[in-house]
Amino acid sequence: MKKLYATLFSALFLGGAICVSCTDKKDASAEEVINTIHKVNNYWQTNHPEHGRSFWDNAAYHTGNMEAYFLTKRPEYLEYSKAWAEYNEWKGAKSDHKENWKYSYGESDDYVLFGDYQICFQTYADLYNLEPDTQKIARAREVMEYQMSTPNHDYWWWADGLYMVMPVMTKMYNITKNPLYLEKLHEYLAYADSIMYDEEAGLYYRDGKYVYPKHKSVNGKKDFWARGDGWVLAGLAKVLKELPETDKYRPKYIDRFRTLAKSVAACQQPEGYWTRSMLDPLHAPGPETSGTAFFTYGLQWGINNGFLDAAEYQPVVEKAWKYLSTVALQPDGKIGYVQPIGEKAIPGQVVDANSTSNFGVGAFLLAACERVRYLNK
């Protein structure tokens, strides 16, 4: 009888130990990713103590930094974004002369209506929601509400712009409750779709210059730029995160998100990354981190929030995260293999472990935060 009790006790103890071990392993995995977030973000902020302008590349980093703050509550992350916003006077492009405001490509202060100078409003809105103060969103309201008062609908003419500004529309709607933000979101996206969405491939060209067959990859294929489609998938995830459940266009956005996710997953490379030209890996071969990270974020967010089937998509995310955490991530916390600022896959362009950029770090942080949420489910 004692031997039987001993056997039962041993089985129960070991069973309990196994369960505890499994729990610890899952917790340790989430904790490991959180430690990676701190390593990456601390490396970036330590090496970039001075704040840059409010243009898209810096602003894209801050979307990742704010997500890292929301997840970890590290006060230094919040302070870093607040200091950046204050440095830029809570503005994008700073012209006050509306008659000169433009939205073609440009980096001067007249390009107020150009989405690359509007993405900063995402972070300003987040900072407002944490500590409401009308000055934080005054310029965002002035710019976006002026833009919405015009008859023009062709403001989003490049794929990147969908990440830059679509989430601004949902964030500003939730602050102001002005329904025009959601109407114009749909109107501007419809225009973008008309010039750069490929129904057959279920992917976006970077802009009208790259539409097939006018433009082809080096091997005669449709040329979809990974970072461009990464911007779109991540932007749609951000929209769905904050869009009211009752919005009449919501089913369309969900359908587009799922279609894009399926097309993206289909062209992942065996090593977990996406090549710069998504359907022609030989056009510009080798890993690229920014597109891969935005895809990882979008897919993991979709799984975490019930929009994508985990059985189908989590294996894609696992391979992508392995690439991001073991190849893109360098021992010192640098994020490598980020294609430099550009608009297309360039044959022969060197992208290596030392290739890093602010927007690539932001994308990595977004992906890592969703990874933690998945592991903690």
Image (cartoon, grey):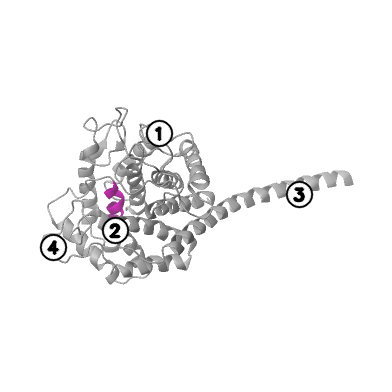
| Nearer the camera: disc 2 or disc 1 | 2
Q: Nearer the viewer, mark 1 or mark 3?
A: 1
Q: On screen, 32 above or below 308?
A: below
Residue at the image position 23 percent from the left and 62 percent from the top: 93
Residue 41 placed where, x, y %?
A: 46, 59
The residue at 43%/37% (across/down) is 286
Mark 1 — residue?
267
The label number, if any, that marks residue 247 in the structure image:
none
Of the two numbered discs 2 and 1 on the same chain, state the one appearing first in sequence: 2
The residue wearing badge 4 is: 98
What secondary structure characterizes most of the magenta part?
helix
Q: Estimate the x, y position of residue 304 in percent, counting from the top left.
A: 46, 47
Provide the secondary structure element on which disc 1 rests: loop
User: Dividing the picture into quarters, in which one does residue 295 lie?
Assistant: top left
Spatial CA distance of label 1 from label 3 is: 47 Å
Circle 2 residue: 55
Residue depicted at 27% across the width and 71% down the height: 135
Taking the image as shown, residue 144 lies to the left or right of residue 83, namely: left
What's the magenta region? 160-172
Residue 282, percent across and down?
A: 38, 31
Looking at the image, do the residues carrying marks 1 and 3 touch, with CB atoms under 8 Å apart?
Answer: no
Tell me where residue 48 appears, x and y as whole percent: 41, 63
| Amino acid at dot 1 | Cys
Q: Earlier in the sequence, mark 4 or mark 3?
A: 3
Circle 3 packing at 10 Å, graded few (<14), some (14-19), many (20+), is few
Q: Is residue 282 left or right of residue 248?
A: right
Residue corresponding to mark 3 = 13
Cα distance between the residues tagged 2 and 1: 31 Å
Given the image, on which type of amino acid does mark 3 rest? Phe
